[in-house]
Amino acid sequence: MKTIFSKNIGILTVLLSLSFISCKKFIDVPPTGQKIPTTFADYEAFMRNEYDNHTTNVNRATLLLNDRFETTANLNYSPLDGVNYNWNESANRITLNNADETTYYSSYSTISTTNLLIENVNNATEGTDAQKAELIAQAKIIQAIAYYTVANYYADTYEEANAANKRAVPLITSANVDAPYKQVSVKEIYDFMLKNVDEAIPALRATSATVLHPNLGAAYAFKARLYLTMGKYNEALTAANEALKYNDKLFDWTAYYAENKSRIEAVDPNNQPVYSLSPSPMGFNFVETYYFRHGLSSNNGRELTIRSDRAARYENGDAMFASRWRQRTVGPDTYFTSITNGFYNHSGLTTTEVYLIKAECQARLNNIGGALTTLDAVRVKHIFPQNYVASSASTVIQAVKLIQRTKGNSLIFGVVPFADMRRLNKDSNYATTLTKTEGGQNLSLSPNSHLWTMPFPLGAIKNPGNGTLEQNVSK
């Protein structure tokens, strides 16, 4: 699979610079000894460059949620990480965020690359009209996904009543570095994402060249995510059902555990755990994938570690959790360490997410029985048979909370749990105060804390290009 994604990498070292320079200048002045994009294949190579165009780093959101374990030494090395991890509301995050931040710059690099494709693919030599239209459509889906990340990172969550009046993020629609842009409202950025998806759908196919190339299932899955975030449950349900027409498969974690039981439970002669690794089942061939996108790390390695108190929020008998993490103690620290390695579709689009979007929409529309049936289609693949009990709820609120428990656990380390908690915190029925004990101190994060919106990096504020950029937080 890696070989497929690396196709045409020889020209990508040059092509990637387009994220930072003018399209026109690049095409007019070919680099010495290098190839410039002219053919359809040249442009299509961008779609196969997984590390630059298919990675979403949401490190600080993951730290704020305390979904991961972090050592004191690492937090001391990065003060802003410590502020998020320990919910320090008195700190000035704007001052601390004085270095390049991967979330912001990587997302806008992806946006620039997709703008390049949208603007230029139709002028490529070779390739059919249908192929060009499909590549442009795929770029629009990926661009919308990048905008979803920055909109949920650096701006307030979508609320219908005030979305038109709240400042969001820069909307950039050209790869030319000199092109003017506007910092649009929350409503405008969501309208733009929906427009991208709707324009893309007619040119997409049911299947695509690789999991890095969004297909129709991916488009509808992302549309469902967008509408759910906007609180438009009928529309989200319709989109989720469309996505499931293209892929409704769920990975069976109980079967995976049974197949790997001896390795997972291995101990040494002193009855101490042996942390042997097996290949991640969540890689490029993951049966649930509509679209693959790397998370915090794009390297072939282990997942992040999980705090013990966070691990306790998984259901008793969760085979998915047991298959991926095992408790470990190193010095004063006890946490759950990864027991798989490889690649993980933490930031892409999967059937599990779509099933749980569908379930929440069914609950919100008062179909509680249908919602629990949809939820349990996921849970039965996650919970050991001896621990499994069918979900039960008598109210919409109870049902949504059950769905969110499974969703937050299943999609850990991606942007979705962060985006979900932000939107749910706006409703007193679901708002959650996070609590923990750290270093002997009782700490908490309230639903209305300003920490739920990240500050733009200082470099972006000081060098806004051909536009203006204002912070959305005071500190």
Image (tube, helix red, strand yellow):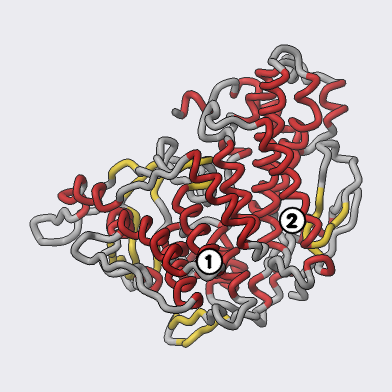
Residue under the image location 19 percent in, 50 percent down? 258
Residue 434 in sight: yes
Q: Quadrant of the C terminus?
A: bottom right
In terms of secondary structure, where does tag 2 sit? Answer: helix
What is the x, y in percent for residue 229?
63, 62
Measured Cα–Cα span from mark 2 to mark 1: 26 Å
Mark 2 or mark 1: whose residue is earlier in sequence: 1
Q: Mark 2 is on which residue type? A: Tyr
Residue under the image location 65 percent in, 74 percent down? 451
148 and 26: which is toward the camera:
148
Quarter of image, res 387 = bottom left
Q: Mark 1 is on which residue type? A: Leu
User: Disc 2 marks which residue?
Assistant: 190
Residue under the image location 47 percent in, 64 percent down? 408
What is the x, y in percent for residue 34?
72, 17
Q: Residues within 10 Å of mark 1 (few under 14, many from 20)?
A: many
Quarter of image, res 326 = bottom left
> Where 87 falls versus 354 (above or below)?
below
Marks 2/1 in contact by CB < 8 Å: the verdict is no
460 and 209: which is toward the camera:
209
The circle on residue 63 is 1
Residue under the image location 73 percent in, 19 percent down? 129
Q: Between tags 2 and 1, which lies in front?
A: 2
